[in-house]
Image (spheres, helix red, strand yellow):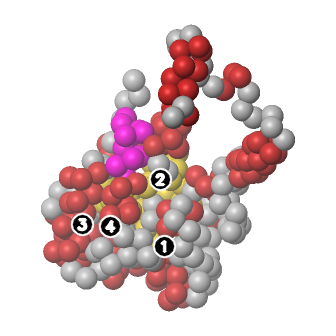
């Protein structure tokens, strides 16, 4: 059995310069594959809105969406640290609502911690959730829920002014009590400095070397084809494999190749008995 890692393990891995491997998963199969492969952490990201539910952004995702997918992932990866991603408007309104929804992730989906986006502006929410006993991972840089304010899905911190703001965000997240932070789509030079500045683990996605790396499973497996971020490395092309498989199925059905005798369940009693029974339905 795989031993589930926890916060003390992740802190130790940072101290020993051993990178944490982190991947998104949204369903039972991928979660079970990730655990079997030996992943350190799984994020059930609100990115499910785009790569699973077909939205063009993450904001339409609801708490119920996230909880349902977290429950499936937990069943698939019972021995892996699972992070629930708080969706848009599940924490922005008030400390009370933030605490309540964070608690739902723990109570209803059995996740190990939550992640939320933002720095200085959400620091009070982070503090409130942590004080309620729920571990928090911060998220700064390219934050999809506020991509409209950022001018779209664009890299952040590439000039001195915006980099200074991100440093303030990073410090605010740490001071609010988050046990780690995710930096997304920022220059590797800025990531390196944030790692020096903070004492908590700094994980990256499209941000260069860090204390660990996050990838979106649908990107790295070649499942999501709407667009591919520059920072994605594709390790497989599952979409092509699945498409070709479905094409083969269509062809074989239309040509009468499938199903064959190998794909059916034959009767367990003499066929004559069935034929007699069939006659009962056609004779007057």
Say which residue label 3 marks.
Answer: 101
Residue 150 place in picture, x, y as percent: 54, 86
On the image, numbered disc 4 is attached to which residue? Answer: 63
Q: Secondary structure at mark 3?
A: helix
Are the residues flagged by discs 4 and 3 in contact, CB closer than 8 Å?
yes
In the image shown, does 166 or 6 lie closer to the viewer?
6
Q: Nearer the viewer, mark 4 or mark 3?
A: 4
Q: CA distance from mark 4 to mark 3?
A: 8 Å
Image location (x, y in percent) of residue 212: 52, 51
- Residue at 47%, 48% (x, y): give it: 27
Q: Earlier in the sequence, mark 1 or mark 2?
A: 2
- Disc 2 marks which residue? 26
SS category of the residue bearing label 2: loop
Q: Is residue 36 left or right of residue 227?
A: left
Asked whether the residues under the numbered discs 4 and 1 touch, taking CB atoms below 8 Å apart as contact, a structural biologist would say no
Question: Which of the numbered marks, if any, corresponds to residue 58?
Answer: 1
Query: Could you tell me how far apart the alpha carbons at marks 1 and 2 are, in whole angstroms?
Result: 14 Å
Residue 210 appearing in the image: no
Residue 69 vertical placement versus 57 (above, below): above
């Amino acid at each position: 059995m795989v031993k589930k890692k926890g916060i003390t393990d992740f802190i130790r891995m940072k101290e020993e310069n051993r990178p944490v491997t982190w991947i998104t998963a949204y369903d039972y199969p991928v979660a079970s594959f990730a655990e079997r492969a030996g992943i350190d952490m799984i994020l059930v990201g609100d990115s499910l809105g785009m790569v699973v539910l077909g939205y063009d952004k993450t904001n339409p995702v609801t708490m119920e969406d996230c909880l349902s997918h977290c429950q499936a992932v937990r069943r698939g990866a019972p021995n892996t640290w699972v992070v629930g991603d708080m969706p848009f408007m599940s924490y922005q309104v008030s400390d009370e609502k933030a605490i309540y929804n964070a608690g739902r992730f723990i109570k209803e989906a059995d996740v190990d911690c939550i992640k939320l986006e933002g720095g200085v502006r959400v620091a009070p929410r982070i503090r409130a959730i942590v004080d309620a006993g729920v571990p928090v991972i911060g998220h700064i840089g390219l934050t999809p829920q506020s991509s409209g304010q950022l001018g779209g899905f664009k890299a952040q911190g590439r000039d001195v002014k915006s980099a200074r703001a991100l440093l303030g965000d990073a410090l605010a997240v740490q001071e609010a009590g988050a046990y780690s932070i995710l930096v997304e789509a920022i220059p590797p030079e800025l990531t390196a400095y944030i790692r020096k500045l903070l004492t908590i683990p700094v994980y990256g996605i499209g941000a260069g070397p860090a204390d660990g790396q996050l990838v979106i499973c649908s990107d790295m497996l070649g499942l999501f084809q709407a667009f591919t971020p520059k920072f994605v490395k594709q390790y497989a092309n599952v979409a092509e494999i699945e498409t070709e498989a479905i094409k083969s199925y269509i062809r074989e059905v239309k040509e009468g190749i499938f199903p064959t005798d190998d794909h059916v369940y034959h009767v367990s009693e003499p066929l004559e008995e069935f034929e007699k029974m069939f006659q009962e339905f056609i004779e007057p």
